[in-house]
Image (cartoon, grey):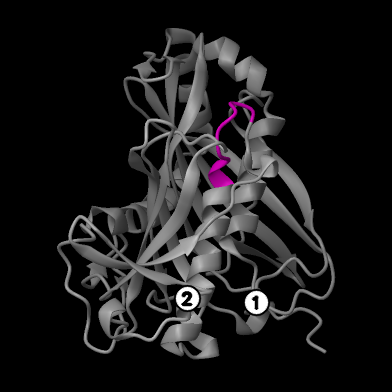
Amino acid sequence: MEDTAAPSSAMPDARLAMVKDFTIGRGRRDRNTAIAPSILFELCMETRLAGNREAIHELLGGRYVIKAQSLRFHHRLRHLFEPLEVRVSQSIGNLGNSSFEYLYSIYCEQPGKRVLLATAVVVCVAVRAPGEKLPLPPNFRRIASAAQEARMLEDSRRRRDSDYASSLLSIEMDSVPTSEGAINPRASAVPVTQLSLVTSDGVDYFAMPVLLRPSDEDWNHHVNNVSYVRFFEDALEIVRELAHVPFGARDVDAMAIDYLRECSIRVSNCRVLVRLQPPPPENALEDGSQATTTSLPSLAFLFQGREADGKTYIYARGRVVAATLAGVQEDDLVTNDD
């Protein structure tokens, strides 16, 4: 999975297509000593903001909200005891009537080579007001089309990767039976202090309470899209412990999140619902390679809360696949393993 071609330097408009360098600080890793998806999603978000959010809003004639995002790892990075220099390349993907995509590639430098760590896709929707979609204006389409042409080859690879991650969401969470050997919520002894058992629409889930903080709020005064990723990661760690998942099988290979409703930090009784599912069927990717599966289940997530009207709403849903995709390498990316 080594990538030897440098990102194109022909960036038509820095508001949409750009390259930004970051330093991932020492110790920024999850409990499995790997870089967590939330860290990479955060770098993608900071790259978008570096493109001048106000200028993009001016181009759109409104603002944009994040509708969905997905990420797929290509190489695993462990034991990050020293700062790591990474480069995030951003460009534009598909354009809809009111939607557009940001495409990302995240690289790091290794001795004698440049390695692709992960690819991500973020789907945005232009809005004039909450719930009112805004058609993409001609000037925005012109600038976005120039960004597409400048990065056609890289966009194609990111599109293939993101299609697999996004397809995880197409599997209805209440229509897939629990796989043999997976956690059955009704049959598991779950510590009350960690998770509780709940039923939503006739489906059993583990529930982890979530306390929203001011730091979770974005510039639109709603819960930040990266905060949802962190909530899912926290719930994932607890479920892994309950399922006694081996250390080497705990890594996330692909994650997809769909944002269904904007959530204020004033929403009460927030919680993450988790359900273990069997792995999706084997997928043949466009390049002919196979996304292999193992006996490990994937995990489906819901983020739920209660608003002032007393009604409970689902604000986001996600799916995580761990230790099921071929081609994720880690042995050549162990840094300062002492």
Which numbered marker is on residue 192? 2
Q: Which residues are magenta?
A: 219-226
- What quarter of the picture does the C terminus occupy? bottom right
Q: Residue at x 42, y 19 (%)?
A: 130
Image quarter for residue 108? bottom right
Q: Is residue 28 visible?
A: yes
Vertical order, 133 against 193 (above or below): above
Inspect the magenta stretch and tell me whether residue 69 lies in it: no
Total numbered circles: 2
Report the side of 313 relative to 278 (left or right).
right
Residue type indicated by callout 1: Arg
- Return the x and y of residue 311 as percentages of the image width and height: 33, 38
Rendered location of residue 180, percent (x, y):
22, 87
Q: Is residue 220 magenta?
A: yes
Above/below status of 165 relative to 309: below
Q: Residue at x 58, y 52 (%)?
A: 211
Judge by depth and name the residue closer to the eye, 84 or 160.
Answer: 84
Q: Which residue is mark 1?
A: 31
Q: Is residue 106 visible?
A: no
Amino acid under disc 2: Val
Q: 98 or 229: which is nearer to us?
A: 229
User: Callout 2: helix, strand or loop?
Assistant: loop
Q: Residue at x 57, y 57 (%)?
A: 230
Of the residues tagged 2 and 1, which is closer to the observer? 2
Q: Main secondary structure of the magenta part?
A: loop
How many neighbours does mark 1 have within 10 angstroms: few (below 14), some (14-19), or many (20 or more)?
few
